[in-house]
Image (tube, rainbow, N blue to C red):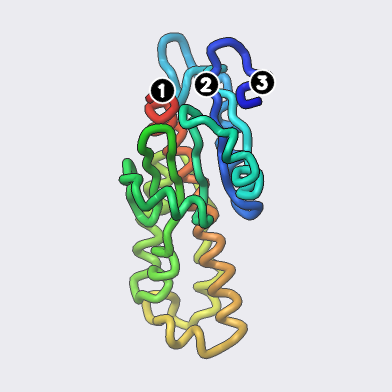
Amino acid sequence: MFGDGMQKNELPLIIVCDDKDMVYANYLIQLIGQKDDAGDSIVGVEDDSVSAAIYTVKNYKDNLPQIPSTQHILFIGQTSVAKEQSKTIPDAFNKLGMHYGWLGKRAVLYVDDTTSDWMKLKDSKKHYTEFWQFSKDRGMTHPDALAEYAKKLSGGFVDKIMPVVVGAPKMLIDYNKTVNAVKAQQYKTLIKVFYEDGLRSFVEG
């Protein structure tokens, strides 16, 4: 049953995601498990105050009849169940394509398709740099995901737009890889921001 194996006073949290987003759910659990509080200063949630478990979408659907309305659930990514929840959940955070928010005991966290839009613009490097700097300011330093892709475009990003890129199958593959790499960075930054700024308010609400 839900909550089995928890220490006294731990708040149970279910994280729902698909297989491709499991790495981000695991990252959040790693952050939750840190002993990062110092004296009266609490980072994220208080140490040992939250017990989290990861459910796949199938696990969630199979157990849905037994999950109480009082159970805190975080939906990561843009799965069908996450999209359904997000219809009625307002954003608590919305920046550079990264979103999280909650209503009652349900929360969503996802990266939208802004990254794909960035790559279609002449100033895509500018948008990515803004994200990269935001991440750095939050203690997350990412490798330059655009560097390798930019080398393959004569004149770099500032002189190219998407229609030129999609004309070559190889460049389209590189484009897709780059978009996925940037999204992975966005998710890691977003998880850290949620842990530090949002998780405590959500699970204690």
Q: Which is more N-terminal, label 1 or label 2?
A: 2
Q: Earlier in the sequence, mark 2 or mark 3?
A: 3
Residue 104 seen in this snapshot: yes
Quadrant of image for the N terminus: top right
Q: Residue furthest front?
A: 65
Percent position (x, y) of residue 44?
Answer: 45, 26
Q: Determine the CA span between mark 2 and mark 1.
A: 8 Å
Q: Of all residues shown, which one is farthest toward the right?
A: 5
Could you tell whether 14 is left or right of 197 in the image?
right
Give the x, y percent position of residue 70: 46, 27
Q: Where residue 4 is drawn, which disc sits there? A: 3
Report the residue at 37% width, 42% height from top. Answer: 101
Do the residues under discs 2 and 1 have CB atoms within 8 angstroms? yes
From the image, tell me which residue sits under label 1.
Answer: 204
x and y, in percent, of residue 123 in the image: 34, 71
Q: Residue at x 55, y 17 (%)?
A: 10
Going 58% across and 10% down the picture, which residue do you hit? 8
SS category of the residue bearing label 1 = loop
How many angstroms separate mark 2 from mark 3 (CA)? 11 Å
